Amino acid sequence: PGWLLSPAGRPYLDSILHKNQRRVFGLLERPVLPPVLAVPTVTYKLFLAGRSGVGKTALVAWLGGTPAPPAHHETLGIEATPLFWPAKPRASGRPVLFQLHLWD
């Protein structure tokens, strides 16, 4: 659970942070890692659906490390937010970079 804060995981965490806050990546961008730390990327698309005003957009903002909108504004259409998260699964001893496309 504390792998990201360990000396082995810290370079991966630093690749997604900027001034101790999560970096916002565009749809075609990804974190830059040195060649010795290159890891496979696992991509998932997560579609969030639910009633209006329940907090779907606020959840995506929280997961992405951006401030949630202060007032409720209905999301028109679909808003896609890319989110990168490095992890080291217990089954394989090798780190991976999860690329989550959150569709709100």
Image: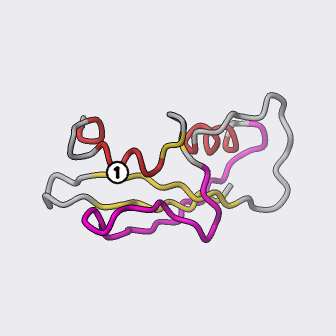
Please report the residue visible at 81 percent of the width from the left and 61 percent of the height from the top: 77
Please report the residue visible at 38 percent of the width from the left and 61 percent of the height from the top: 33
The amino acid beneath tag 1 is: Tyr
Q: Is residue 55 left or right of residue 39?
A: right
Secondary structure character of the magenta stretch overall:
loop
Q: SS at mark 1?
A: helix
Which residues are drawn in magenta?
Answer: 24-53
Q: How far across and down, in percent of the image, does residue 45 sit? A: 53, 65
Q: Is residue 29 left or right of residue 85?
A: right
Coloring scheme of the render? secondary structure
Q: How far across and down, in percent of the image, does residue 21 sit? A: 54, 36
Q: In which quarter of the image is the C terminus?
A: bottom right
Q: In this view, does 73 lie to the left or right of 69?
A: right
Residue at the top extreme of this rendering: 70
Q: Is residue 38 magenta?
A: yes
User: Can you identify the residue that label 1 sits on?
Assistant: 12
Report which quarter residue 96 is drawn in: bottom left
Q: Does the magenta stretch include residue 87?
A: no
Q: How far across and down, in percent of the image, does residue 61 sit? A: 64, 41
